[in-house]
Image (cartoon, rainbow, N blue to C red):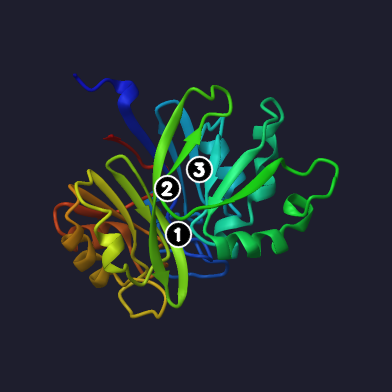
Amino acid sequence: MKETDERRIHVTILGTGTSTGIPVIGCSCRVCQSSDPRDKRLRCSCFVEADGVDLLIDVGPDFRMQAMRAGISNIDAVLISHHHFDHVVGLDDLRPFLFREQSKMACYTNEESGRILRNMFGYIFGGGNYPGAPNLTIVAVEGTFSVKSRRDPSRSVAVIPVPALHGDLEVLGFRIGRFAYITDTSGLPASSLELLGGLDVLVLDALRHERHAKHLTIEQAVELAQGIGANETFFIHMTHSLLHVEENEALPDSMALAYDGQKFSVGF
């Protein structure tokens, strides 16, 4: 059967920056002062539209601005890579997505991050009745899971969690069809590499050129991406040491730095 547009996965990269965001407050380096909009990097997040299901990957401190800029009007569920501040502190900004469709919105993550999020956001996940708290629930995942549309429960999409290491912390990447998104990682176990064959697009952490205990360098990310073999790879979670145009000129033809607001479509 010919693939229709409905069977495409539409991806919007909402943010590509490290935890400080770029420009860094008070910094006068050439990247922070760059006039290239691709060097302006909000905290990492991604929006995925797949088979009538709208998924948000991570929800950091810039989420409100990102959602308005991207024109996001619905979110069915949140996929949370891990509990670090720059990936979760925007949870409260999900409230407007619950005004009209008041059914619970699931936040899928691993067990440890779920436990920590319940402590961080007790007024949301603590079982109380705090007025106006977003109607969210934590769902701990291990294997492949299905996410339903909150507006039309007959619509669903399968998500494959991809375990990764962020230093000594276990985090999650996510695969949806022939698209995979892996942020904040220093490496993948062999079992996770086996989940990443046949990708159209891989989005992958690549912090900087200097080594870091909890992130891939550009060189390490290129090597890992070459081993995975996606048709295209876009790098995210960059610091202000990377000038977009210069880095792209040096990367292999199938690889590039992602940029805020970037859109693309992939197949199932």
User: Can you give x and y, in whole percent of width and height, for residue 109 in the image?
Assistant: 53, 55
Residue ID for mark 3:
56
* Residue type of the residue flagged with mark 3: Leu
In the rendered image, the quadrant that contains the C terminus is top left
* Residue type of the residue flagged with mark 1: Gly
How busy is the neighbourhood of tag 3: few (under 14 within 10 Å), some, or many (20 plus)?
many
Residue drawn at point x = 58 percent, y = 29 percent:
150
Q: Is residue 73 above or below residue 2?
A: below
User: Can you give x and y, in whole percent of width and height, for residue 5 in the image?
Assistant: 30, 22
Please state which of the two labelled residues, at mark 3 or mark 1, is closer to the viewer. Answer: 3
Residue drawn at point x = 26 percent, y = 67 percent:
190
User: Can you give x and y, in whole percent of width and height, for residue 144 in the image?
Assistant: 40, 47
Task: Using the numbered discs, state the Cα–Cα distance from disc 3 to disc 1 in whole angstroms.
Answer: 17 Å
The one of 165 and 234 positioned closer to us in this rendering: 165
Dot 1: what SS?
loop
Dot 3: what SS?
strand
Mark 2 and mark 3 lie on one chain; the one further toward the N terminus is 3
The one of 132 and 139 positioned closer to us in this rendering: 139
Residue ID for mark 1:
17
Residue drawn at point x = 17 percent, y = 62 percent:
227
Q: Quadrant of residue 189?
A: bottom left
Mark 3 and mark 1 lie on one chain; the one further toward the N terminus is 1
- Tell me whether the residue at label 2 lies in contact with that at label 3, contact meaning CB atoms closer than 8 angstroms: no
User: Can you give x and y, in whole percent of width and height, for residue 264 in the image?
Assistant: 31, 37
Please state which of the two labelled residues, at mark 2 or mark 3, is closer to the viewer. Answer: 3
- Tell me whether the residue at label 3 lies in contact with that at label 1, contact meaning CB atoms closer than 8 angstroms: no
Residue drawn at point x = 21 percent, y = 48 percent:
232
Residue ID for mark 2:
260
